Amino acid sequence: MTTKLTELLQITYPVIQAPMFLVSNTKMVIEAMKGGIAGCIPALNYRTLDELRVAIKELKEAKVEGGSFGFNLIVNKSNVKYRGQLEVLCEEGCDFIITSLGSPEETIKQAHKAGIKVFCDVVDLKFAKKVEHLGADAIIAVNNQAGGHRGDTSPEELIKHLVANCSIPVISAGGVGCKADIDRMLSYGAAGVSVGSPFIASVEANVTDEYKQACVEYGADDIVVTERISGTPCTVINTPYVQKIGTKATWIENLLNKNKKLKKWVKMIRFSIGMKATEKAATKATYKTVWVAGPSIEHTNKILPTKAIVERLVN
């Protein structure tokens, strides 16, 4: 399974264990590396820069041949920790950084100086060309099958469109839950895939057993898109609580969103409230179950060690 992604990261299989807020941790990534793939953690999963530094050192010590590790950075102004996180990553070193929600220009400049590759989340050709021009090493093509915040375009259409118009590798994000899905994405021209939701139901994940079991019991047809978490469409499991509160923004939010001066603040407040609710549901037993996941949980039949999930995906 040699592709441009395996060559870029020196991994055995063209798979990245996607960074997931609250879910991803060093245990998962270490086991992913042992399985021959790359693992990635959101830098925001660490409350302090010292905690982030400790995690990097742990991963460097545990790295094995055929595996690699990286971190995800939110690069817009809403992440006040961004510059400090970038500085720590460049000082300590990692194999790659995935950027989301903003311009990756500064990240690319600083990371390349430190010998770190940069992959950038995009949802269309316009942003893909922008990050290519800025010097990104690869594109993470977020399609309409992704978990969490997703794109609007089908995997086939998005991958083929980007591959035909960009000169850097395209990594598909969304809609992969088994080996056949990986083969399909590669057949469209992708250099690899980013896989998240199947790893929620891993033994090593930092979430409740209830969340993991939900990924086992629910399937693709139980995934709905809600505006009630961050103000931006996000995929969640359609639990009774989600059905109760609805998936559309309230009339007050819609009204305030029409005001140009207030729109930014409304989104920030909604994002803060939504993230706190998501964190409680993921880490504590609660009836307010807002569990983020994508349709690829369709292939999740039991809670397994990370390494076993990797083996299911690549063999």
Image (cartoon, rainbow, N blue to C red):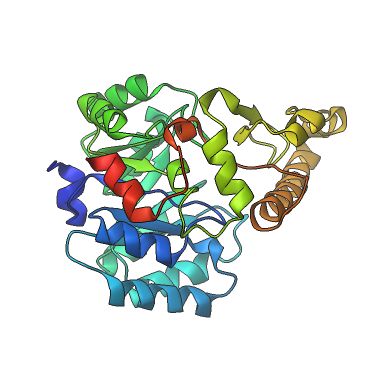
Does any portion of residue 167 appear in the rendered image?
A: yes
Q: Using the image as rendered, state which of residue 296 and residue 159 is in the foreground.
A: 296
- 217 over 279 or under it: above or below: above
Point out the image quarter for the N terminus. Answer: top left
Q: Residue at point 45% right, 37% down?
A: 301
Q: Residue at point 24% right, 24% down?
A: 188
Q: Splitting the image into 4 quarters, where does residue 193 fall? A: top left
From this viewpoint, which residue is outermost toward the front?
302
Q: Residue at point 51% right, 34% down?
A: 294
Does any portion of residue 293 appear in the rendered image?
A: no
Residue 116 as seen in the image, left or right of residue 216: left
Residue 49 as seen in the image, left or right of residue 59: right
Percent across and percent down for residue 159 are 31, 27
From this viewpoint, which residue is outermost toward the left?
2
- 249 over 75 or under it: above or below: above
Residue 78 as seen in the image, left or right of residue 119: right
Percent across and percent down for residue 267 are 73, 43
Q: Using the image as rendered, state which of residue 31 and residue 224 is in the foreground.
A: 31
- 293 over 298 or under it: above or below: below
From this viewpoint, which residue is outermost toward the right?
252
Percent across and percent down for residue 138 are 28, 44
Q: Using the image as rendered, state which of residue 232 and residue 220 is in the foreground.
A: 220
Please state the total of marks drawn on the protein image: 0
Q: Residue at point 66% right, 30% down?
A: 238
Q: Splitting the image into 4 quarters, where does residue 292 fall? A: top right
Residue 140 as seen in the image, left or right of residue 232: left
Q: Using the image as rendered, state which of residue 60 and residue 238 is in the foreground.
A: 238
Point out the image quarter for the C terminus. Answer: top left
Percent across and percent down for residue 40 are 39, 56
